[in-house]
Image (tube, grey):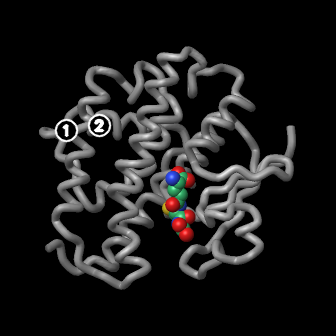
Amino acid sequence: MGKLVLYGVEASPPVRACKLTLDALGLQYEYRLVNLLAGEHKTKEFSLKNPQHTVPVLEDDGKFIWESHAICAYLVRRYAKSDDLYPKDYFKRALVDQRLHFESGVLFQGCIRNIAIPLFYKNITEVPRSQIDAIYEAYDFLEAFIGNQAYLCGPVITIADYSVVSSVSSLVGLAAIDAKRYPKLNGWLDRMAAQPNYQSLNGNGAQMLIDMFSSKITKIV
Ligand SMILES: N[C@@H](CCC(=O)N[C@@H](CS)C(=O)NCC(=O)O)C(=O)O
């Protein structure tokens, strides 16, 4: 096995999804901090690793992969002893893929990034209410996805759970989850928070992002 390096920053949801996956697989890796607010991701050196200049980036034996969903799927295919986290069965995998794309397009891009970019890079401190409504709409979908299952795709945890919890655990700082309205989502979040090393791998970074949001937002309009 080659040397694994993860480039990222704690507050970043997709970085945390990769950390949860690496830990679940019992993989050793070096973690290298990329300070986004200081622009370290825009340097020539980092662009050579990832021309899209996003974190996370995974280095495996001198080769670079970026995009957390691609990284997590790669890690399971390449290193897992069982396919539980990302099943080989076509239908089961399609279900995991659907949730991964939901995280990418709806939760991360549609909810987190749309709120974060104006706040952190454009100094706009008011958040349109429609963006908070979009979070609740996403929670409605998740409530339906979970249904009576323990995890997002069935009775066992998959990389879709790691991906989705990375953003939901920060979105709760913008849109609280009412256990009466979202009993399934609330129960799932509790089960995820009980996973080994959850706090150090995801909880602390999720809180950092919540604190960054709180320090910038002056009003919901
Ligand atoms: N869909 C991507 C999102 C990656 C992403 O946008 N990461 C943010 C940090 S949370 C970033 O690197 N932003 C800096 C930039 O876009 O220049 C993934 O899952 O890896």
| CA neighbours of label 1 inside 10 A, class few (<14), some (14 to 19), many (20+) | some
**Residue 112: x, y in percent?**
37, 60
- Residue 155 falls in image quadrant: top left
- Residue 187 falls in image quadrant: top left
**Residue 152: x, y in percent?**
39, 29
**Residue 169: x, y in percent?**
38, 51
**Residue 191: x, y in percent?**
38, 34
Q: Describe the element under mark 1 as helix, strand or loop.
A: loop
Quick check: can you spot residue 200? no
Quick check: can you spot residue 69? yes
Q: Is residue 2 left or right of residue 115?
A: right
Looking at the rendered image, the quarter that the C terminus falls into is: bottom left
Q: Are marks 2 and 1 in contact (CB under 8 Å)?
A: yes
Q: Residue at x 53, y 17 (%)?
A: 90
Q: Is residue 172 above or below residue 156?
A: below
Q: Describe the element under mark 2 as helix, strand or loop.
A: helix
How far apart, in angstroms, are the residues tagged by discs 2 and 1?
A: 9 Å
> Which of the two marks, 2 or 1, is nearer to us in this view?
2
Looking at the rendered image, the quarter that the N terminus falls into is: top right
Q: How many numbered markers are drawn?
A: 2
Q: Is residue 25 left or right of residue 115?
A: right
- Tell me which amino acid carries mark 2: Leu
| CA neighbours of label 2 inside 10 A, class few (<14), some (14 to 19), many (20+) | many
- Image disc number at residue 182: 1
Q: Residue at x 70, y 50 (%)?
A: 65
Q: Is residue 123 above or below residue 169?
A: below
- Tell me which amino acid carries mark 1: Tyr
Front residue of this view, candidates 170 and 221:
221
**Residue that label 2 marks:** 142
